[in-house]
């Protein structure tokens, strides 16, 4: 939860930092990319992968926070 709160403080520009596809979305935060998609191995679960950190981090927290706060702007679930 602390990572989501820390990531929620990041200023994100949807037009330039977020890329949506039918498989999920990619958020670019500084030099890090975070991809959130449905996990093909676990039904109804999300897979979250970051390019900079091995585990949970503020980048992944920002992506999760954005997904929760901007779900209308990101499109239908």
Image: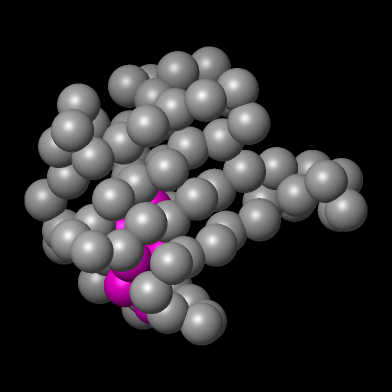
Vertical position of residue 65 compared to residue 9: above or below: above
Q: In the picture provided, is 71 more to the left or to the right than 73?
A: right
Residue that extends furthest to the bottom in the rendered view of this protein: 54
Residue 58 is left or right of residue 67, and the answer is left
Q: Which of these two is toward me, 67 or 13?
A: 13
In this view, the residue farthest toward the top is: 76
Pinpoint residue 44: horizontal percent, then vertical percent.
Answer: 79, 43
Q: Residue sitting at 50 percent across and 50 percent down?
A: 35
Give the percent coordinates (x, y) of residue 17.
23, 40
Q: Position of residue 69 (x, y in %)?
A: 33, 40
Q: Is residue 61 above or below residue 44?
A: below
Q: Is residue 30 above or below residue 56?
A: above
* Residue 61, magenta (yes or no): yes
Is residue 4 visible in the rendered structure shown here?
no
Toward which corner of the image does residue 68 lie, by quadrant? top left
**Which part of the image, by quadrant, shows the N terminus?**
bottom left
User: Which residue corresponds to the image point at 75% horizontal and 49% vertical from the top-left?
Assistant: 39
Quadrant of the rendering where the C terminus is positioned: top right
Instruction: State left or right for residue 7 relative to residue 60.
Output: left
Magenta span of residues:
57-63
- Residue 13 visible (yes or no): yes
Q: Residue at x 17, y 45 (%)?
A: 12
Foreground pick, 51 / 14: 51
x 24%, y 57%: residue: 29
Tell me which corner region of the image, top left, top right, bottom left or bottom right, holds residue 24.
top right
Residue 26's x, y, as percent?
A: 42, 43
């Amino acid at each position: 939860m602390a990572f989501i709160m820390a990531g929620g403080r990041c200023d994100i520009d949807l037009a330039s930092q977020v890329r949506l596809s039918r498989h999920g979305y990619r958020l670019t935060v500084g030099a890090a990319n975070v991809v959130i998609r449905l996990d093909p191995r676990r039904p109804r679960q999300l897979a979250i992968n970051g390019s900079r950190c091995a585990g949970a981090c503020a980048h992944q927290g920002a992506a999760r926070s954005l997904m929760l706060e901007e779900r209308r702007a990101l499109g239908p679930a």
